[in-house]
Amino acid sequence: MNVQFKKGVLELCVLVLLDQQDRYGYELVQKISNQISISEGSVYPLLRRLTKEGYFTTYLKESTEGPSRKYYQLTNTGRIYLHKLLQEWKDFTYGVNELIKEGVKDD
């Protein structure tokens, strides 16, 4: 998949997954990687930025498989931002799909 496409939707994917439940970084990478091919290194800078912007809070939780894990939790501000992005995504994809319908001839 085009790298620019992925960069554009990665933020939305992370927000959607954290709206479902709190998750740690590697768990987010794995969940997204099941659907979209991404590098692990692309998620952590995004998590730091979104946390700094107030969309997430973090907490440590003990793990039975090693050191404590840093979990990310969506804040109310993050939830509002998520719904704004979802509407923008719906508007954007609708417009692109309409253009594709007009321009691509099915053979």
Image (cartoon, grey):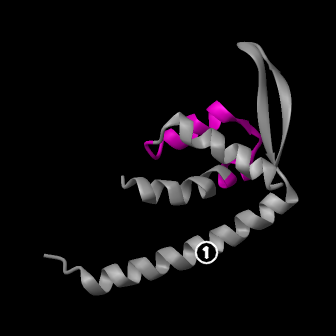
* Residue 30 on image: x %, y %: 55, 34
Please say if 46 is above or below 105: above
Would residue 33 be found to the left or right of residue 88 on screen?
Answer: left
Please say if 85 is above or below 97: above
Please say if 5 is above or below 68: below
Would residue 71 be found to the left or right of residue 10 on screen?
Answer: right
Label 1 secondary element: helix
Q: Quadrant of the C terminus?
A: bottom left
* Residue 87 on image: x %, y %: 64, 74
The majority secondary structure of the magenta stretch comes to helix
- What residue sits 26% from the left and 84% below the top? 103
- What residue sits 49% from the left and 39% below the top? 33
- What residue sits 79% from the left and 67% below the top? 80
Residue interval drawn in magenta: 15-37
Q: Which residue is mark 1?
A: 88
Look at the image and say whether residue 18 sits in the magenta stretch. Answer: yes
Dot 1: within a 10 Å radius of its alpha carbon, few (fewer than 14), some, or many (20 or more) residues? Answer: few
Amino acid type, mark 1: Glu
* Residue 61 on image: x %, y %: 84, 25
* Residue 54 on image: x %, y %: 83, 54
User: Furthest-bottom residue in view?
Assistant: 102
